[in-house]
Structures are given as C-alpha cells and as structure tokens.
Image (cartoon, helix red, strand yellow):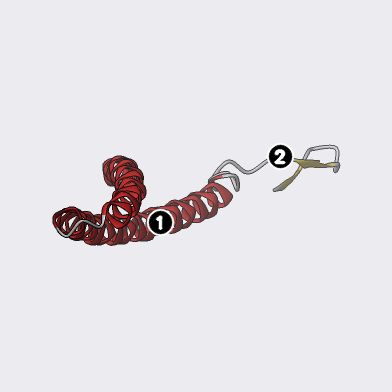
Amino acid sequence: MILNSAAGIGMAVPCTCRPPLLLRPMCLSSNINTEQLRAQLDQLHSEAARTRAKANSARLRLLRLSEAAEKIQRQAAISVQTGKENDARELLFQKKKVKQALEKSKSCIELLDELSTKLNKVE
C-alpha cells in the first residue's frame, strides 16, 4: 500500500491484512507427501500380498516334497524286500536329496512368514 506524506512523497508500507503466501505451498507439499505415503502404503500392501502368495506356494511345494519322500521310502522298502539292494540305496540317496530340499523349503516358508508379518505391522 502507498501512503502520501505531507511532503508529497509516497511511502510504501507493507499490508498485513493478507495471510503470508508461505502457507499455500506448504499445503501443496502436504498433499504431495500424503500422496507419496499412500503410494508407499499401496506398494506395501501389494508386497505383502505377493509375500503371502510365495509362502503359500512354498507350503504346497513342501507338501509335494513330503509326499515324494514318503513314496521314495515305500519304494526303497519294497526294493529291499525283493532283494534289489542297489535300487534301494539309490532310492534312499534320492530321498536324502528330497529331504534337503524339504528343509530349504521350510526355512523359506519361515522367512516369508516373518517378512509378511513385518509388512502387515507397517500397514
């Protein structure tokens, strides 16, 4: 605002009736931060869903491996009964490999469950 003094010189005086302009950009920044947080939350939700799906797939694999180990054990027992000891040895070696895969699958499931739990805590 410009005021005229008695000498006829104009003086500039700041107007204090308007709110500062700095508040508006902060609101825009807040909206951007909110949107970023929502996007991150959506990413966490989808990551949690993917983790649960991986854990469920690993559980199915664990079930198949367990069934395979039992089947190999039965086949080895039959091979021993029929006198095919070399076949039984080979089957037991296969069973050992299946059991190792089973243990890896168990540890994978535990890790995926732990990750899923942590992701759900963030939500």
Q: Nearer the viewer, residue 107 or 98?
A: 98
Q: Position of residue 110 (x, y in %)?
A: 28, 41
- Asked if marks 1 and 2 touch (Cβ < 8 Å), the reply is no
Question: Disc 1 residue type?
Answer: Arg
Q: Say which residue appears at 35% left-offset and 45% top-offset.
A: 108
Figure quadrant of residue 74: bottom left
Marks 1, 2: nearer the viewer: 1
Q: Which three-letter amino acid code belongs to the residue tagged 2? A: Val
Question: Where in the figure is residue 14, as x and y percent of width and height?
Answer: 68, 40
Q: Secondary structure at mark 2?
A: loop
Give whichever of discs 1 and 2 has the lower sequence position.
2
Front-lying residue, 123 or 20 = 123
* Total numbered badges shown on the rendered structure: 2
**What residue sits right under mark 1 in the picture?**
38
Residue identified by numbered label 2:
13
Task: Name the residue rendered at 30%, 40% in the picture.
Answer: 114
Residue 109 shown left or right of residue 41 in the figure: left
Badge 2: few (under 14), some or many (20 or more) residues near its Cα, within 10 Å? few
Question: Where does the image place residue 36, in percent across and percent down from the top left?
Answer: 49, 54
Q: Residue furthest front?
A: 83
In the rendered image, residue 97, in percent from the top left (x then y), is placed at: 36, 48
- Which residue appears at 20% of the width and 56% of the height? 83
| Marks 1 and 2, how far apart at CA | 44 Å
The answer to which quarter of the image holds residue 70 is: bottom left
Q: Is residue 6 left or right of residue 58?
A: right
* Left or right, 29 with reference to 91: right
Assign a secondary structure to mark 1: helix
Q: Nearer the viewer, residue 13 or 41?
A: 41
